[in-house]
Amino acid sequence: MTDTPRKLLIVEDDEGLQSQLKWCFEDYQVLLASDRVSAITELRRHEPAVVLQDLGLPPEPNGVGEGLATLQETLALAPHTKVIVVTGHGDQENAVRAIGLGAYDFTQKPVDVDMLQLLVGRAFHLSALEAENRRLLEARADAPLDGIIAASENMLALCRMVEKVAPTEVSTLLLGESGTGKELMARALHRLSRRAEQPFVAINCAAIPENLLESELFGFEKGAFTGAHKTTPGKVETASGGTLFLDEIGDMPAPLQSKLLRFLQERVVERVGGRSEIPVDVRVVCATNQDLKRAIAEGGFREDLYYRIAEITITLPPLRERGEGRIVLARHLLGRFAAQHASAVRGFSDDALAAINSYAWPGNVRELENRIKGAVIMAEGKQVTAADLGLAEHGDGEAPLNLRAVRQAAETRAIREALARTGGNVSRAAELLGITRPTLYDMVNKYGIAVETLGNGGGR
């Protein structure tokens, strides 16, 4: 299934048997170890798919304690590894113990070479099948918009926009508070584009010191500065053919803004210390949590660069504005983390749901992820509580599920907004709301809305 050498680790303290087994498996890349320490070292270094291990290892070659401990440590470090244990003649009891601890199979001494070759070959075949299955599952889980939970209207609209923009070549600017998922959206844009099979290269403009950012972006020639021992392409070149994601573009220093603008206009880069221009075909996606228009007004960001990177602008709503999407996302994350940590937690208590709805989530989705992950680990029952989330003070109220109350709140908001838009003109507000003027008057009186406070009171 692969051209990569199949690595087989043989853990055996008998040097003669080591040599015999190495000769038997000359078609494999054989690694040798004689005790637990060397076995774990080889496991960490080479990550073999299959381990052939004697249960009788020093310092107790006539017992199985050290061998079983080695088996357990191996599977704890590399749970997908297929371990075939070798037991003493007739030692059925310890063979069963090893299988119970997670060993793939066992064989007994004296070793039957043909049987052993069959077991090892079958173990490699199964390991390859399982690895391919995991790869396919990860690919499916890594689908273009997977992980983007679009349960609210604003998120559904955003996803539709991403699907429209992705197949084009326009430069896209992603705006949103920290933790709203800007890089997730950037990757979705890449995966839905014609460049999906090419590199996606991300660089955080705020995380790299100013004196290093230029060489990180555009690369450098050998000898360009102290420590430049070899010519190194930058992130822009590395992304050629694919997508370059410039995160925190608002923090890019002014001198580099000029060089980035030139690249966007000419589509060529010049390495630090270089003389030649290198053409690069790359799509650029940028992101920031800053107000770039304010930065332009204050002289901190180039206006011409802004219009180059913002041919299309997508604004990600903060978590507090995603309505019912908060609960849907929270349930999705709970399921994922519960599976990862083999937790018995299966849902949220009422106070946890109320807390998720009422809390402002200043850290957005990233904060929600961290709180739920911690809660899954710390929860003592099958439900995560507000206290488990560290939000006990936000979980006292009940979620507003009464339909009459929800409708009244929604109608009140809509009427207030319509009156505000029309300057208090009831006739125009009624037209905007799609109802008659008498009906609007009835609703204004019913909900106690003061028309004069919302406009000039005219046109009634």
Image: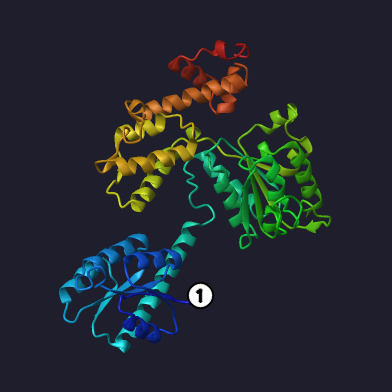
Residue 80 can be seen in this image = no
Number of numbered discs visible in the structure rendering: 1
Indicate the position of residue 441 as horizontal and vertical percent values. Answer: 51, 17
Q: Position of residue 298 (x, y in %)?
A: 73, 26
Q: Is residue 345 left or right of residue 299?
A: left
Q: Position of residue 51 (x, y in %)?
A: 35, 73
Q: Can you see residue 43?
A: yes
Disc 1 secondary structure class: loop
Q: Is residue 25 above or below residue 274?
A: below
Question: Which one is nearer the viewer's eye here, 309 or 66?
Answer: 66
The answer to which quarter of the image holds residue 85 is bottom left
The residue nearer to you, when weighing 436 against 109, is: 109
- To which residue does mark 1 refer? 4
Question: Looking at the rendering, which quadrant does residue 309 occupy?
Answer: top right
Residue plotted at (50% across, 47% down): 148
* Quadrant that contains the C terminus: top right
| Amino acid type of the residue that numbered disc 1 sits on in the rendered structure | Thr
Q: How is the image coloured?
A: rainbow
- Residue 280, position as x, y percentages in the image: 75, 57
What residue do we see at 56% from left, 10% from top? 452
Q: Is residue 9 left or right of residue 186?
A: left
Residue sitting at 63 percent across and 54 percent down?
201
